[in-house]
Image (cartoon, helix red, strand yellow):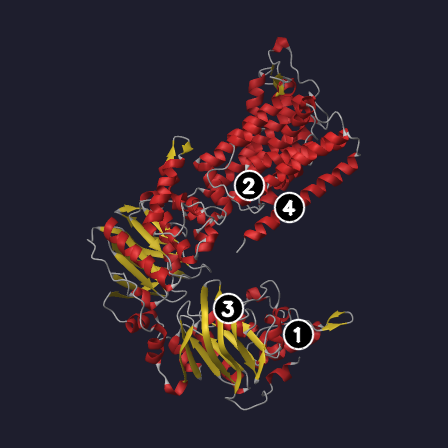
Amino acid sequence: MTVQGSLQPAAGRIGDVVMSARDVAKHYGAVQALKGVNFDIHRGQVTTLFGENGAGKSTLMKILSGIVTPTHGEIILDGKPVVFANATDALAQGISIIHQELALAPNLNVRDNIFMGREIRTATGVNFAEESRITRELMAELEEDIDPLTPVEDLRLGQQQIVEIARALQANSRILIMDEPTSALSASEVEVLFKVIRDLTAKGVSIVYISHHLEEALTVTHHAVVLRDGMMTANAPRSEINLEWIVRNMVGENFDLGSPPESEMGAPALVIDDLCVPDRSGQGNAVDHLDLSVKAGEIVCIYGLMGAGRTELMECVAGRLKASSGAVRLMGADVSRLSIAQRIEAGLVLVPEDRQRDGLVQTMSVGQNLSLASIGAFTRGLFTSRGDEQTVIDTSIKEVTVKTDGGDAMIGSLSGGNQQKVVIGKMLATQPDVILLDEPSRGIDVGAKAEVFKLLARTAQERGLAVVYTTSEVGECLSVAHRIIVMRRGRISAEFDHTVSKEDIMAASGEAVHH
Amino acid sequence: MADITSTSTGSGGMNIGKILLEGRAFFALVAIIIVFSILSPVYFSVGNFLIMSSHVAIFGLLAIGMLLVILNGGIDLSVGSTLGLSGVVAGALMQGVEIPAAGVILYPPVWAVVVLTLCLGAFVGAINGVLIAFFRVPAFVATLGMLYVARGVALLMTNGLTFNNLSGSEALGNTGFDWLGFNRIGGVPIGVIVLAVVAVVVGVTLARTAFGRWLYASGGNERAAELSGVPTKMVQISVYVLSGMCAAIAGLVLSSQLTSAGPTAGTTYELTAIAAVVIGGAALTGGRGTVRGTMLGAFVIGFLSDGLVIIGVSAYWQTVFTGAVIVLAVLLNSLQYGGKKR
């Protein structure tokens, strides 16, 4: 359990297969997250997993790190099949995972975080001096000048990541799984991280790396594995591949997600003028002087990586986040000062990104969820009219084709795709002029995805609705959207019509050319 | 109770889970009545039921206000103190309000006393609501503070003493305060009728008005409700105002029943009210619960403790029994809701 032990070269030759997954599958109910994947981790090398959202990367990582047990298949560690009871068990065998959302206690200092749950105990309590000494050694090893007694909340995100890595090293990890480690880091912090990764591999630690920044990942990886729809579609060493190879294998042949409807475009329905939204730290701008105009009947797709400011833009336009400057105009009228409810009344609605947290009321039925935003439409005097409410519900169920009978079922009994249709139906029932959808395809299967996009195309065409949706999957840009906007760091970095290629979109987002 | 429960039924969304959940409180009530009727010959009579019901009225009124707050996902610990303060203020008004500048003592008529007391309850609730909704003070802390403040003010007003003369006098035109506590209509105590009216009004509000739907939605998922255009802050403040008003009504009924208003009246009643709501199947996390269930919960507690008194069990044992019933109810609730989770 000492530092020296953890950083000594592990036994065996660099490049040997140290851990592998054989035909691993995972089902969540009827949903197949992973459909039989073979995957090798090489000693002292970096293996990068590529794939779009929902391709199964996270599930595979969770299986390798013992958080999830596979429905089928086996894990082989050092040539012997193993079954992890839980994450602690995997950790004991030398496998650590660093999640995208760091798992540190912000109120504790660096030393206590590193030794959390593994304190060096003595007869009289904890040997803090020894813990501090080891922490200092780890920090020196990682070339990061952090005092062991600094509270973690005072550290920059990049430093917090270093603390996570130190914690993994302290636990004697020889396999380190990193899920999107660079998504929140600055360019210089990425440099530091990559240097740490190279040092670790030189010492025999094997790294599994997940990233959406393709080119960045290519600079550090030794092997590339591409997942798509729960299957491994390609697998090759770094020397044999390039960016184009990854994109081709990631996106693959598309499921038909529809094409832009031939709707009659009217006057600008939504105009965003020089909009700024402060980011969470309050120092920078999540949305940075952004201008956008969307016509009635038009469908606009906003593509961007995580942290590009898409969600902030959507939430600000819908009225949940305050803008620091700029204006939002709906059918010519300034709605910047209106509340969410007033904006809905005026005809501007949002289908939020996180359907469980922001979209649905789990304690209510399907029907009550559908009618929630349009209660005024079936209130007669003081009381709601059951008949009129049922009409609203039935119309919505038919319009968005929710598979349910009459709306009395609890919302939790529906599949993800049908739940998403309920959220969309709820907002459409308010008879809006503009509908914003933040990642409408998140967490729903391909069939439901296609239905959602067809629904958007139909409403834009029939009702003359202006539709704005965001996505982080490039395949979805080239579906029903007339226009594709690429966002990067709070600004519009490019604008395309629907004939653009996937590669151009990805390049404009910073996905392909980064740092 | 039959007519009340049927009018305050939840909307069309009936399902077996709900029926079972509320059925539990109902079966408990039936069991309590049967057991005590066997143990004591005087328990099972209309007269006794009405007396017990008038005791239940106090807790029941508090519990209805508490239900609204709990449906919103909050808690109101101040209702017992608000009840006490309301009684004291009503008592003080009955003694006459001296206006030194004009050199006169005003004796407001009883209706004015009632209205002013209700306003007081609403005011206390509004302070809670604003603290919670706009200043983001946790409901537990805000109402805990109000528990102390309201009780302290009641003690200050009376210097710890009790107003005993609440009947007013013919000459001053302020008689009739004891009507609330003593009179009966068709044999039913006014307090019970007040409870029934409040229960029906709140029940219909929950089931059939936009406000009711907003309350269930914002209690179930405040973020989703807000994004659907529900004025969540207004709803949040309203439930505390309504809870304060329910406490004020309960304070009026109690001081009228006792024909005295003491500053320590209603101490720990907030806990009984919470217990009634929980026994009635409401979820402390918000979004689930009905007036019908809460009424059953209030009657379970009231009929149980009065029954224990009637058969001569010591007050200490009563406390033990009540506690056990509460824990059992929550245990069953969490089994029920736990099973619903995916």
Q: Position of residue A420 (x, y in %)?
A: 40, 55
Q: Which residue is mark 1?
A: A132
What amino acid is found at the position of numbered circle 1 in the picture? Ser
The quadrant of the image that shows the N terminus of chain A is bottom right
Q: Is residue B288 visible to the viewer in this orientation of the structure? A: no
Q: Which residue is mark 4?
A: B330
In whole angstroms, how far apart are the C-alphas of marks 4 and 3? Answer: 42 Å
**For residue B116, what is the image quadrant?**
top right
Q: Nearer the viewer, mark 4 or mark 3?
A: 4
Residue drawn 34% across the image and 57% down it: A452
Residue drawn 62% across the image and 65% down it: A108
Q: Position of residue A410 (x, y in %)?
A: 47, 48
Q: Which residue is mark 2?
A: B19
Q: Could you tell me which chain the residue with mark 4 belongs to? A: B
Above or below, A50 against A427 in this view is: below
Residue drawn 48% across the image and 47% down it: B222
Of all residues shown, which one is farthest toward the bottom? Answer: A13
What amino acid is found at the position of numbered circle 4 in the picture? Val
Which circle's residue, 3 or 1, is located before the other in the chain? 1
What amino acid is found at the position of numbered circle 3 in the picture? Leu
